[in-house]
Image (tube, rainbow, N blue to C red):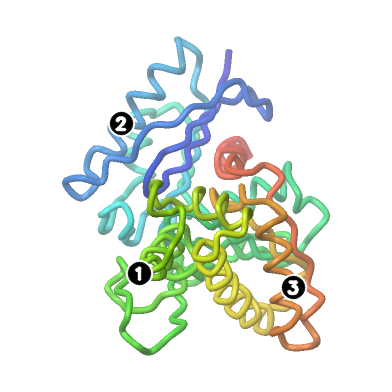
């Protein structure tokens, strides 16, 4: 049987889907090994592909990575420890008979949602992936905008403060993702916990636990979520003023918070956004955390 693999490489885990044309046959994940500047990452992916292919004919491999990509070359990826990596060529060398495509992870998530998810009705939208960092996929007139150097949509590195409070993996300070990603939310909660009563003291301080406690009214957890939402709404308001998209599609692991997050985000956005864009639609990625593997598989078979 012919099969296609869709790979979504994240800062903490790598999601892998095996497809027969557009049908997902199975999916799994492995831990992202960022030790030694991420030199084991592609080898780990190859091992898992070989294990899952089970003798099937691999006709396509699509990969999303959390960094700028130009013509299959990763132009630096701090969350993985990568510098310049000719990822497409490396994968093609291992699987010479397969169609290989490597793109930015948020771009492939946007493609996945446009092809098979909640963005099917939009031609102009911004995919926002909230995970270890923040990714963005900009779609204009049905086409992903990658930019001159592959950095189109790298919204996670918009500088939101000039206070040098939180250093980003990119080397700069106070990037968007240091405040509004899962990592940023945890940092905020840890700061707010000091000297205050919260059930977070008894739990692992994770994005999921913070949201779960916020839903119960835990004061510290709720304050952390509200600070995250304030930053999200303000920054997306600025992006909307520049691009005027039909919609923002919210995906990534943090999107599992569902309507609790989305309702807060929409309300704050309506409050702070420039009035001609204040009614921009917001939808959750219907493919959830699988948008990346769907999009990666789609570009590998297109």
Which quadrant holds the N terminus?
Answer: top right
Residue at the extreme top of the image, as rendered:
55
Q: Residue at x 72, y 50 (%)?
A: 114
The part of the image, by quadrant, that contains residue 44 is top left
Q: Residues within 10 Å of mark 3 (few under 14, many from 20)?
A: few
Q: Residues within 10 Å of mark 1 (few under 14, many from 20)?
A: few
Gap in angstroms between the C-alphas marked 1 and 3 = 30 Å
Comparing 204 with 186, the one in front is: 204
| Residue, disc 2 | 44
Nearest-to-viewer mark from 3 and 2 = 3
Q: Residue at x 62, y 65 (%)?
A: 138
278 left or right of 31 in image = right
| Residue, disc 3 | 267
Comparing 220 with 173, the one in front is: 220
| Residue 153 percent coordinates (x, y) | 54, 67
Q: Residue at x 38, y 24 (%)?
A: 48
The part of the image, by quadrant, that contains residue 79 is bottom left
Which quadrant holds the C terminus?
Answer: top right
The disc at residue 284 is none
Tag 2 or tag 1, which sits nearer the N-term?
2
Above or below residue 174? Residue 26 is above
244 left or right of 90 in image = right
Nearest-to-viewer mark from 1 and 3 = 1
Gap in angstroms between the C-alphas marked 3 and 2 = 42 Å
Gap in angstroms between the C-alphas marked 1 and 2 = 43 Å
| Residue, disc 1 | 195
Residue at the extreme left of the image, as rendered:
36
Above or below residue 301? Residue 196 is below
């Amino acid at each position: 049987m012919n099969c296609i693999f869709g790979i979504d490489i994240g800062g903490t885990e790598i999601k892998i889907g095996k497809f027969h044309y557009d049908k997902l046959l199975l999916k799994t994940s492995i831990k992202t090994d960022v030790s030694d500047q991420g030199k084991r990452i592609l080898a780990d992916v190859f091992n898992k592909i070989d294990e899952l292919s089970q003798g099937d004919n691999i006709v396509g491999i699509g990969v999303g990575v959390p960094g700028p990509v130009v013509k299959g070359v990763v132009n630096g990826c701090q969350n993985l420890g990568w510098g310049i990596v000719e990822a497409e060529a490396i994968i093609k060398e291992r699987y010479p008979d397969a169609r290989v495509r490597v793109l930015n992870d948020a771009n492939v998530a946007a493609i996945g949602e446009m092809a098979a998810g909640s963005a099917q009705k939009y031609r102009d939208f911004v995919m926002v992936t909230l995970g270890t960092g923040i990714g963005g996929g900009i779609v204009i007139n049905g086409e992903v905008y990658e930019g001159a150097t592959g950095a189109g949509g790298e919204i996670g590195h918009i500088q939101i403060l000039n206070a040098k409070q939180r250093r980003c993996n990119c080397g700069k300070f106070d990037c968007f993702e240091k405040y509004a990603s899962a990592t940023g939310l945890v940092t905020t909660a840890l700061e707010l916990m000091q000297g205050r009563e919260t059930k977070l003291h008894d739990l692992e301080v994770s994005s999921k636990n913070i949201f779960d406690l916020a839903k119960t009214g835990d004061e510290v957890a709720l304050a952390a979520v509200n600070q995250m939402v304030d930053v999200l709404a303000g920054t997306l308001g600025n992006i909307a003023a520049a691009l005027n998209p039909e919609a923002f599609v919210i995906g990534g692991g943090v999107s599992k918070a569902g309507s609790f997050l989305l309702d807060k985000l929409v309300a704050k956005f309506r409050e702070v956004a420039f009035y001609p864009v204040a009614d921009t639609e917001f939808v959750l990625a219907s493919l959830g955390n699988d948008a990346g593997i769907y999009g990666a598989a789609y570009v590998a078979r297109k």
